[in-house]
Amino acid sequence: MADLDDLKDTKEYYLDIPQKSEAFYLKGLNAIDWGMQNRLARIFNPKTGRTVMLAFDHGYFQGATTGLERIDVKIMPLAAYADTLMLTRGILRSIVPPSFTQSIVMRASGGTSMLKELSNEEIAVDIEDSIRMNVSAMAVQVFIGGENEKQSIINMTRLVDQGTRYGIPTLAVTAVGKDMVRDARYFRLATRICAELGAHYIKTYYVEKDFETVTASCPVPIVIAGGKKIPEFDALKMAYNSIQQGAAGVDMGRNIFQSEAPVAMIKAVRSVVHENETPEKAFELYNSLKANE
Ligand code: R5P
């Protein structure tokens, strides 16, 4: 039983100090629950409000693609430099040690391979498994304008509903069909639909023209996918431009793990995202680190 005899009448009420009520630092996410904000704070560094997500979930429709043949050998040495890992539950359980404490964004949609119509996806993970795996967010592909547009949007809204019940945010990944034009107009449409229907943050692609209109018209944070492997300087420039034009980070895969020097590359990307380093300076950093890799 608690000892009640010696209780002192404390006077430390600090009546002159109003209790702080801070706004959450990520745009559009002030009105979500504590658990969800806490998970997002594990993805987006609270000091910079930005994230470097290392994406290696490609195997969920492509199999063992170039650079991902052995995730234990090629990817895990990079993991320490990422703010979060974007992967599938199969790889999480089979390769990532449970002692790894950085955040995890888990792909939660699937159902087709690159041999078939990719938009024909469904939710492919139970919410219970996301909870069991202690993930910080779940990712779902959304095919605006694609053959199975409605199905993919409903996958997203279901995931948002399930995640909201347990405080797990949803990342909507805007997937662009092969024959569709990747321009600011398309991405304004796709990202806004995802945000309007409840996604907590959105992955899209960078476009040279008017990208700032995509980030401005999307009420929640945007991160950019890296896309196909391009020269390191160009990838750093793309990351820089996207950040300067309002993106809250990158979700980059091939341009890191297919680089000649992946550790040097992820460190250079970090400098662009978290320190606003210019592409020129970041490329210098890449080259100097590459010499030691
Ligand atoms: C692809 O389907 C996955 O969603 C990847 O996570 C995404 O495309 C980012 O990887 P990358 O930078 O290689 O495009």
Image: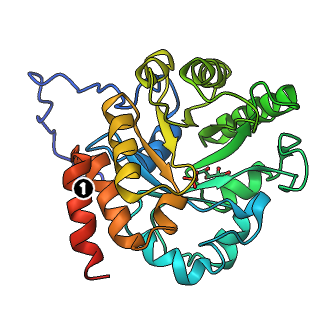
Asked if 208 appears above or below 293 in the picture, the reply is above
The residue at 41%/61% (across/down) is: 82
Name the quadrant containing residue 64.
Answer: bottom right
The residue at 73%/50% (across/down) is: 108
Residue type, numbered disc 1: Ala
Task: Where is residue 77? Give x, y as percent.
Answer: 44, 78
Say how many tags the image has: 1
Q: Can the viewer see residue 6?
A: no
Asked if 196 appears above or below 103 in the picture, the reply is above
Q: 282 and 101: which one is in front?
A: 282
Q: Is residue 62 left or right of residue 44?
A: right
Q: Is residue 208 left or right of residue 200?
A: left
Secondary structure of the residue carrying tag 1 is helix
For label 1, the residue is 282
Cβ of mark 1 under 8 A from ligand 1? no
Q: Quadrant of the N terminus?
A: bottom left
The residue at 77%/68% (across/down) is: 63
Task: Where is residue 152? Give x, y as percent.
Answer: 81, 33
Q: Is residue 244 left or right of residue 125?
A: left
Q: Can the viewer see residue 215?
A: yes
Q: 182 and 68: which one is in front?
A: 182
Asked if 102 appears above or below 218 in the picture, the reply is below
Q: Is residue 67 left or right of residue 122?
A: left
Seen from this angle, which residue lies furthest left? Answer: 16
Q: Quadrant of the C terminus?
A: bottom left
Task: Where is residue 227? Give x, y as percent.
Answer: 56, 49
Circle 1 residues within 10 Å: few <14, some 14–19, many ≥20: many
Task: Where is residue 68? Give x, y as percent.
Answer: 63, 72
The residue at 31%/63% (across/down) is: 267
Name the quadrant containing residue 27.
Answer: top left
Name the quadrant containing residue 20.
Answer: top left
